[in-house]
Amino acid sequence: MPEGVLRIRYLPAGKKPSEPTLVVDATSSPLAGEVESWGKGRPGTFSTRDMRTDWDPSSQQLVIEDQARNTLLRIDIPALVDGKLAVGHAADDAMYGIGGTTAFDRHPGGLLRTGSQDAKAGAQGNAGAPFVWSTAGYGVLVDAIGAHFDLGADRVTAQATSAPIRTVYVFVGPPPEIFSGLAQVSGHSAMFPKWAMGFTNSQWGIDQKELLSIVKTYRAKHIPIDNVTLDFDWKAWGDDHYGEFRWNETKFPDGPNGKLKQQLDAQGVHLTGIMKPRVHIDTEEGRYATEHGLWVASSVPKADYFSLKTIREIDFGNPAARAWFFNDTLKHSFDTGIVGWWNDEADEINDTQFMNMQRALYEGQRAYSNQRVWSINRNFYLGSQRYAYGLWSGDIYTGFESIRAQRARMLAAIDVGAMQWGMDGGGFQGDEPSPENYARWIQFGAFTPIFRVHGSFGQKRQPWVYGEVAEKAAGDAIRLRYTLIPYIYAYEFSRHKTGVGLVRPLTFDWPDDPKVRDDVDAWMFGDYLLVSPVVEQGQTAKDVYLPAGTWIDFATGKVYRGGQVAHLVVDSKRWSDIPMFIRAGAIIPMQPVMNYVGEKAVTQLDVEMFPSATPTSFDIYDDDGLTYAYEKSAYSLHRLTLQREDASVRVTLSKNNGSFNSPVASLILKVHGVKASKVEQGGRPLQPAPGLDALRKDTDEGWVSGADRYGDVTYVRIATDAAKDVRIFDSGARH
């Protein structure tokens, strides 16, 4: 049970609590505390490990304190009785959340929020939540679909657009705990399949022949790819007999019979397809929708821009419409290869249209199959994450101005709980990206949660289209992403469990550093990598601010102390660099590059380790990658801990905390900054190996010393069959 979550509800006399909106997970577990009903006496005072409440009768305010008795918030109860939110806070608190930016905000600014703000999801790429939070150590969520906030110097007020505010949630703690509490209330996200950690090539204007040719070229060039997403082309769009839900047999003759799926399965490629929130009226499916009242009442028949035939919007707020949408025809398309959903253009009706559209697909697929759901959608409202929901930033433009804007869009979306974010790498509309622009898009995309490219009708986004230099830079970035799959997938599970995902703004880890309050130039990729991709044309140098700690340049091994700016030389000719820094204490599991996730069983991981005096940890995670068995603990989870202790480094590995038998049988611990004189495991000495190749191939545990771009390194091979306690004695340490 979370210790820093409080629910405050106003219950009018004699009335039951109102039903929660879609923002709140109806199945959420108990909260730390609850205050309700001011009709019969004052609210009670309570205390947990993380927070306290006190009633101030003179001001009619509920005072929220942290455990150190610092006042964080003063909740105005009379305002809540009037159906509004009014909250007092310290004047210098930095505020975040509420809303992201749309696809066409040319200059989306930073992350700080002040003044008038709307929580909504009615435009392309927008992410909204009736949720405001502060690095001062608190967050406030109102249960409302659509809300207007005013953020003053020391006061937050809010009013819902559709109904009085009756329920408010307060979260206390540092940012990760705030978002953990938010997930507890609004719902935890389901895990994507493991292949979704890889690379996606979307395409509009394609047929079966070209699809197979593209996949063949990726494989021939050894550029990894796991997913091809198809636009209108895959469907019999505009045809009768459920054309919106079935294969286009002219363009994809082997789609309906499953032969295309078999061919792509053999090459490790998954197909995902576009879905629209409308169907054609003068069809079998349209007549069914009319007869059963499945249309949105406010929608009017109009000509579809692609088929030019008359269409109308489905009402996904209607349970009957949601149940019908994953129909027998769509089930056949799923069985024959369309295993994920690209939901488009459901941002025209209300803030929950996209949420309920994907809810229909999520609930339909889960009732039909144990195969994990994958989706991307063009906006986000809090609560959507419950339905295996990814957000992409809309039909953005090509060019460097557009790529620069995506940084703020991503981080602002994460600031409202949209942890699974991606973009049309290369840009969707406008002129073709230049080779340099394309290469930089790919490098940026490799360090986002959902890594994909897409272009407008007929445009190609394959690396080889942009010349040899761009292909080399893009291919290297994609391959780097694939070496990090074990690291990335561990955060997929972490997001599911804790609500905090792979990418997070620097404010999550350094809430007290004023220099990162509005920083969109860099972000954390997991706990241990700080990334700041190049997004300027022809850039020859870049300054990157590094917060407190010790940092190691990923590419060169140069060490920097935090709290200062690192000045980097940028390759403006071959675009070969991705500015990235390793955080001291890092534990980063990596694997060999493969053409696709799961091409070969991974039996051994290399774990890059950069010990510090402060203990650090990492949960190495694995499961079957495809089903929901992880919900019943069918996973493998080993906690690695790392710490430098005087003249030695200690590494521990826990036993497997799950029932899944992972193929990973051994780890090569690459302990940097250490030249071992001896290594012990469980108090007993390990034998040195004749060399690194021999160590990798050996079946016994052992060690060997060497060097790389980071300096001295000791390699230790351990098995994962049981808990381990390894001590590496450093011959170069001062005694």
Image: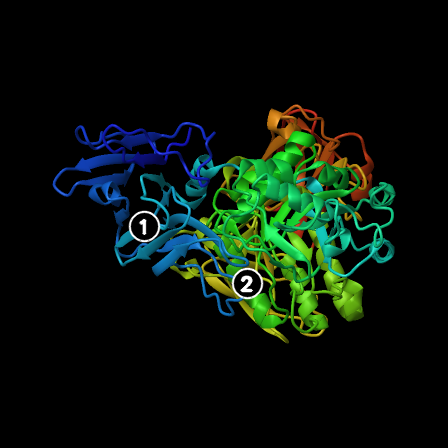
Q: Residues within 10 Å of mark 1 (few under 14, many from 20)?
A: many
- x and y, in percent, of residue 230 in the image: 74, 53
Percent from the top left, x then y, of residue 213? 87, 57
Total marks in image = 2
Is residue 469 visible in the rendered structure shown here? yes
- Residue 630 drawn above or below residue 133: above
Quarter of the image with the N terminus in it: top left
- Say what secondary structure mark 2 lies in: loop
What residue does disc 2 label?
Answer: 103
Depth order, front residue of 156/38: 38
Compared with 571, 305 (above or below) is above
**Label 1: which secondary element:** strand
Q: Is residue 647 visible?
A: no
Report the residue marked by disc 1.
Answer: 159
Q: Position of residue 249 (x, y in %)?
A: 84, 50
Measured as percent of width and height from the top left, residue 676 is found at: 66, 41
Residue 3 is left or right of residue 72, and the answer is right
- Cα separation between marks 1 and 2: 26 Å
Q: State left or right for residue 562 relative to residue 577.
A: left
Task: Give me the residue at 43% from left, 51% from top.
Answer: 510
83, 722: nearer the viewer: 83
Residue at x 45%, y 31% (from the top left corner): 28
Q: Quadrant of the C terminus?
A: top right
Report the amino acid beneath label 2. Ala
- Label 2 Cα neighbours within 10 Å, binned few <14 / some 14-19 / many ≥20: many
Q: Quadrant of residue 386?
A: top right
Q: Kindly identify the amino acid type of the residue bearing the numbered disc 1.
A: Gln
